Image (cartoon, rainbow, N blue to C red):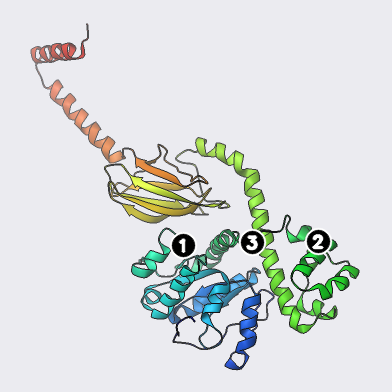
Amino acid sequence: MFPDIEETVGVITGEKRGDILKGSNNNNNSSSSAEDTEQSSFVLISYEDSSFDLASQICDALTEKSIPARMYFEGSEDASKLIESAKVICPIMTQSYQDSKKTQRELNYADTRSVPIAPIMAQTSWRQTGWLGAITAGLLYVDFTDSNKFNTSIGHLIHEIVNLWGDVLGKGHATPVHEWDEEELAAYLNGKDLSQYVDKFLSSGINGRTFISLTESEFAELDIDSSDISHLLSLISELTLEAEVMTTKKAEEAAAKPKAVQKKESQPNRVVKSSGGGSSTHVNFENQSSFECEVFWIDYEGNEVKYNLLHPGGRYRQQTYVEHPWVVRAVGSGDYLLINGARLFFPDAEETLGVITGESREDVNKISDQAQNILNQINALSSKEKFSLFSKLKNILHIQ
């Protein structure tokens, strides 16, 4: 049993199709709530009370995009079962979240159950440390610190959720749901213990595309038992997200070769940004330069997002995705350094070593200043001294 968690009581639910768990705000329906939890697939928003409003906004926004999302409230259901049923957990990271014993137990339990984590950063000028830093080390977080960019942040979060949930979705179905004919939909329903409705769907000519467009009232018109309607709506949400994953992956595979060419031809001034995401991978960044440097991920709008600081000789492992570009800058000067010999680095599908080398402008300027100083000293010599110096240089360089 998951340890007791203090603070609030209740279940957040809604009337939208994506809000698949229509739990009660009291304990009398705890058994039906647990049953719903086992039958459903959803994203779980983990938060501390001070982030309640943001958690609610994110939950509603995901629901609007047909991504089923839940928020846990103490007393309404078994927290451990809720976490075990979640496909992705999104912790809203703040200092208060890190200080809370409740959220620590939640996320630690999710981590031990290998539930994929999509961290949300909700506090400016702050970075997670301690237990929270250990669990989220190397994970790409989505920045929600600017309320004016909420819709952009939701788009980034959905992208991360689709990538993480994609490891679960898309297995067992050769084609997305909107391409299924009536027989394929019938086979799917049989596999979900809904065979009592197969004849009704077949006689109504309902295929995959029609199925995912059905609403609660339309299911009722088909005389679907009310106890099964919420289950069917849950399946629709899951199939819709699965179709998005499959379609995205297909588009990325089709564009893979042209993008590979673009990598080699990328110029320093070219606008580069993350796309698609591709498969999850890791990069081991190793600073072999003489500079303290900062590692940046280039986000979906072309902005550089700082992820780590590396001292000379430093090394760390970074989780990322294929087609997500990275750059490194020298601290102080802000000049680009090289990763594996290139200014712009794209991860491979296989885990890669990213060796940081190269001279910054500060180094080049220093060498230039030294060269100019030598020339000034030479120019100050007398003709006889210059002749003597050049004679010695000819002998050293074996010039005839």
Where disc 1 sits, the SS reads loop
x, y percent for residue 7:
45, 87
List the residue tagged with mark 1: 141
Name which residue lies at 40% across and 36% down.
Answer: 341
Where disc 2 sits, the SS reads helix
> The residue under label 2 is which amino acid type?
Glu
Return the residue found at the far front. 1
State which quarter of the image contains the C terminus: top left
Name which residue lies at 66% across and 49% down.
Answer: 251
Name which residue lies at 24% across and 33% down.
Answer: 367
Q: Is residue 239 left or right of residue 118?
A: right
Between the C-alphas of marks 2 and 1, the distance is: 38 Å
> The residue under label 3 is which amino acid type?
Leu
Is tag 3's residue or tag 1's residue first in the polypeptide sequence? 1
List the residue tagged with mark 3: 169
> The residue under label 1 is which amino acid type?
Tyr
Q: Is residue 141 left or right of residue 213?
A: left
Name which residue lies at 55% across and 66% down.
Answer: 154
Is tag 3's residue or tag 2's residue first in the polypeptide sequence? 3
Between the C-alphas of marks 3 and 2, the distance is: 17 Å
